[in-house]
Image (spheres, helix red, strand yellow):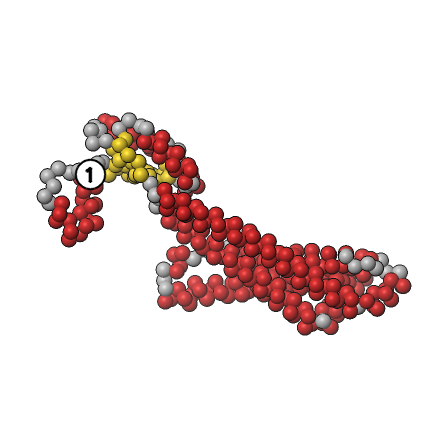
Amino acid sequence: MKSLLYYFQTAIKNIWLEKWINILAVLSISIGLLIICGFALITLNLDSVLQRWASGFGIVVYLDPKTDQETEASLKNQFLKDQDILEVTYISKEQALRDVKQTLGEDAIILDDIKENPLPASFELKIKSELLQSSFIKEKSLRIKQISGVADVQYGEKWLSSLNQISRSMKIGSIILGFAIFIAVTFITYSTIKIFFYRRKEEIETLKLLGATKSFIKLPFLLEGLFIGTVGGIISSLLIFSAYSFTTLKIAEFIPSIRLIMAVFPIQAYLIIPLAGAFMSLIGSYVAVGKIRY
């Protein structure tokens, strides 16, 4: 117990004595964590927006003009039983023509001279969001096209492919940036603790002469690194929380639609950030004291 008390007292004393270097290290770590958290928040919101867009995605199945009502009913039942399909909407030829006229607005007059409705009946199939991969949708569309009574199948192939590519790129970018920040935070702590170690070289030599073990000498440095990373993480969490609150409460007053695209940052993340900072700094501290010979 006395040893543990000594470790904490030594760490606190050294932190105060080297306060300016510690402040610089803490700010550097908090900025690094803030960058990765900001990027993660942007990725989370972008992914949320993409998911909302994807929720309206579907496959349009155009029926053969010669298809009778019995065949249409059979196709509908087949689609309803399909586990990959969430929703099936039937659009008759008449409904399709009304929709076109509504879209054209005043220009719909050009359709008045058409005596026979040229538009086919169709089914709009809403696919499960977790299955919205371009390769899967393409294969699914080809299978549906081979069904008797189906004339053509259409879906936003390029749009879906771009959607998946954006989401994948953002996630890969988050991983790469996270790894880079991990290296940076570890290096900052490593450099800081190494400076502290050399500044206290005489004190350490005295402890060695008195019979102090390596662990006894190392632990205060490890606690200092732990402190630096934790405080940096706390500052980063507070800044992220402040920025998020300001955006949702103040900016949303002028741009209300921002609430629709802003994803909620998990409350657990505000606790994980200081822990992540502490973990990274602890590794840097451990490497710093481990590489120096006693």
Name the secondary structure under disc 1: loop
At a point 71% along the width and 69% down the height, the residue shown is 15
At a point 58% along the width and 64% down the height, the residue shown is 31
Residue 264: image x %, image y %? 46, 56
Q: Which sits in the foreground, 241 or 285?
A: 285
Q: Is residue 15 left or right of residue 103?
A: right
Residue 18: image x %, image y %? 72, 71
Q: Note whether 49 is above or below 145 in the view shown.
A: below
At a point 48% along the width and 50% down the height, the residue shown is 169
Residue under numbered circle 1: 119
Which amino acid does the dot numbered 1 rest on? Leu
Quarter of the rendering containing residue 34: bottom right
All told, the count of numbered labels is 1
Q: Quadrant for the N terminus, please.
A: bottom right
Q: Is residue 14 left or right of residue 103?
A: right
One can see residue 196 in this view? yes
One can see residue 8 in this view? no
Q: Is residue 206 left or right of residue 232?
A: right
Q: Residues within 10 Å of mark 1 (few under 14, many from 20)?
A: some
Quarter of the rendering containing residue 260: bottom left
